[in-house]
Image (tube, rainbow, N blue to C red):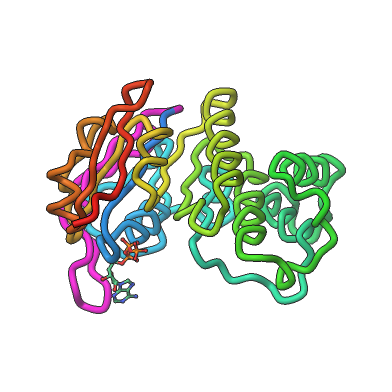
Amino acid sequence: MTVAVRGLDVALGGRPVLRKVSLDVPAGSWTAIIGPNGAGKSTLLRAVLGLLPSDGEISVAGADLGRLKPRQRAKVVAYAPQNPNLPVGMSVFDYTLLGRSPYIPHLGRESARDRAVAAEVLDRLDLAGLAGRPMNQLSGGERQRVVLARALAQQTSVLLLDEPTTALDIGHQQQVMELVDQLRLSDELTVVTTIHDLTLAGQYADDLVLLSGGRVAAAGPPAEVLTREAIEEHFDARVRVLPGPDGRPLLSLERP
Ligand SMILES: Nc1ncnc2c1ncn2[C@@H]1O[C@H](COP(=O)(O)OP(=O)(O)OP(=O)(O)O)[C@@H](O)[C@H]1O
């Protein structure tokens, strides 16, 4: 397993947030963490990154990330947070280039290859035209794609994405999900993403993990996890679940 979590407990502010969470993500596969607001999805990603004190076992590509220096960690796993700190006035290109930091020697400058990687990623995300624009002058969806661009520029084998599509229109949602899927297939990327759109999660992920109240309530292929009963129980929502043409579930809200 490229990402393996066993019996993970995390407490924040003296309150348990994750309880005995386990997760197995094989190399080259895509797992989506779903669950209601406050279930612990972002906390799980941050714990996997080694950014939070936790009990239990976490291994990513064979390493305990909590024991690695940030520079080493950034060569193993790239993380696109939900609400990143954005340096004021920094251009889209320079922000994307930050993803190359682990490869740039101390006190050195980026190489032509680093610049080429950043430019290629921006191009693939339809952002080349914004390369010179300051980050604080972007729309929410543009900013979200640049944060993903920075993560992709790291060229790691594991990608952790926190809500990568929330601010995106339907076309850019598809573009981002397809791009991540292509990278997964071509470069054997292992992907773990939190995501609120359950149909989107079910269309792209190999496996879903449903977190509820900090515990794993269900895990497995989308058709097994996305049931009408589970959605009602954990999200308090009434939905219709129909199998799509490829057998993956499609959800639509049912008005009371
Ligand atoms: N630093 C903190 N101190 C105390 N509690 C925290 C802290 N950070 C998060 N929490 C709490 O932990 C719980 C899980 O938060 P988390 O952000 O992981 O949820 P989530 O499933 O990602 O939610 P959402 O879907 O709303 O983004 C929430 O109840 C939140 O209020």
- Residue 150 percent location from the top left of the image: 65, 52
Residue at 23%, 33% (x, y): give it: 220
- Residue 129 percent location from the top left of the image: 83, 52
Q: How many marks?
A: 0
Q: Is residue 27 magenta?
A: yes
Q: Quadrant of residue 248?
A: top left
Q: Nearer the viewer, residue 9 or 42?
A: 42
Screen quadrant of the N terminus: top left
User: Which portion, as a residue range, is magenta?
Assistant: 1-28
Whether residue 68 is situated above or below residue 53 in the rendered picture = above
Residue at 24%, 50% (x, y): give it: 254
Q: Nearer the viewer, residue 148 or 28?
A: 148
- Residue 160 percent location from the top left of the image: 47, 47
Q: Quadrant of residue 191?
A: top left
Whether residue 40 is situated above or below residue 193 in the rendered picture = below
Screen quadrant of the C terminus: bottom left
Position of 220 with respect to 156 (left or right) is: left
Q: Is residue 31 magenta?
A: no
Q: Quadrant of residue 131?
A: bottom right
Overall secondary structure of the magenta section: strand
Residue at 60%, 39% (x, y): give it: 175
Q: Nearer the viewer, residue 27 or 75?
A: 27
Position of 202 with respect to 79 (left or right) is: left
Position of 102 with respect to 209 (left or right) is: right
Q: Nearer the viewer, residue 213 or 228?
A: 228
Q: Ligand 1 is located in which of the four quadrants? A: bottom left
- Residue 122 percent location from the top left of the image: 74, 46
Residue at 37%, 21% (x, y): give it: 246
